[in-house]
Image (cartoon, rainbow, N blue to C red):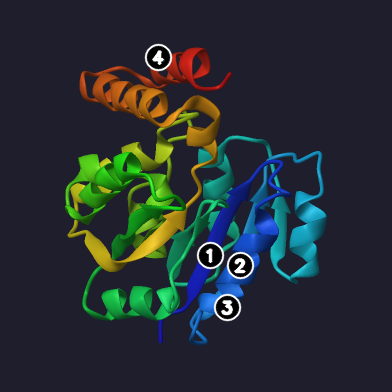
Amino acid sequence: MASISIIIPVLNEEAYIEKLLRTILKHSTSNQIKEILVVDGGSTDNTLSIAKKFGVKTISCPSGRAKQMNIGTQKATGEILYFLHVDSLPPLGFDQKIVQSYNEGYKTGCFRLKFDTQSYFLGFFAWFTKINQPICRGGDQSLFITKELFKKLKGFNEEFVIYEDNEFIRRIYKVTSFKVIDDFIETSTRRYKKHGNVRLQYHFAMIHLKYYLGSGPQTLFNYYKKHIAL
């Protein structure tokens, strides 16, 4: 029976890590989860101490989400890797649904997305995550992938400070079938509250467009720093 290693990259996430770990424990309904790895990029708050209270594995390394996830994979011992953002809460029975997809022959996939808000504007964009195309994917939807396929694709490209999930998923789509599980992961709207729904969604769209037009990782990061990381 396939086992799952959950990999969570963090940096100063004391406000979210406890809620996520409690949700994982509450919403996992099988013995498929072999381990939870919290990969810290140099937090200066209580993120690590909170995580350690739950008895999960903690790993410290240089910051950079792609680097953190790659290092987490090196320490993982499960056949299935499950990458999870700290502010995205997986649905009830997520582990069984991942294993079921694996048993159906899928080596990789994600959940559909919903936001923790009643905003019709954001709900409109979340609806598109039901469509099985790479343009409709993102890290907030989480990602499961076999360790074998992850190694074959050489993991996340650490040149991408942002957009690392999207770049990796585009490579996945080129080599295998991708499963969109018909259930919802709930993600936080904390960045939308900070920047405004329309403004932030516009800048995300521009980053997508720049990537599709051939912009490299540094250009994308420069745009992100100028318009989002304020």
**Nearest-to-viewer mark from 3 and 2:** 3
Q: Are marks 4 and 2 in contact (CB under 8 Å)?
A: no
In the rendered image, residue 190, in percent from the top left (x then y), is placed at 55, 40
- In the figure, 199 relative to 116: above or below? above
Q: Amino acid at mark 2?
A: Ile
Query: On the rendered image, what quadrant is the N terminus found in?
Result: bottom left
- In the figure, 220 relative to 60: above or below? above
Dot 1, how many residues are within 10 Å of its Cα: few (below 14), some (14-19), or many (20+)?
many
Say which of 92 and 161 sits in front. Answer: 92
Dot 2, how many residues are within 10 Å of its Cα: few (below 14), some (14-19), or many (20+)?
many
What separation in Å lies between label 4 and label 3 (alpha carbons)?
41 Å
**Mark carried by residue 219:** 4
**Nearest-to-viewer mark from 4 and 3:** 3
In the rendered image, residue 35, in percent from the top left (x then y), is placed at 60, 72
Q: Are marks 2 and 1 in contact (CB under 8 Å)?
A: yes
- Quickly name the residue at label 3: 26
Instruction: Identify the mark nearer the N-term, 4 or 3.
Output: 3
- Quickly name the residue at label 1: 6
The answer to which quarter of the image holds residue 199 is top left
Query: On the rendered image, what quadrant is the C terminus found in?
Result: top right
- In the figure, 100 relative to 39: above or below? below
What separation in Å lies between label 3 and label 2 (alpha carbons)?
14 Å
- Quickly name the residue at label 2: 36
Instruction: Identify the mark nearer the N-term, 4 or 2.
Output: 2
In the rendered image, residue 37, in percent from the top left (x then y), is placed at 62, 61
- In the figure, 75 relative to 198: above or below? below
What separation in Å lies between label 1 and label 4 (alpha carbons)?
31 Å
What separation in Å lies between label 2 and label 1 (alpha carbons)?
5 Å
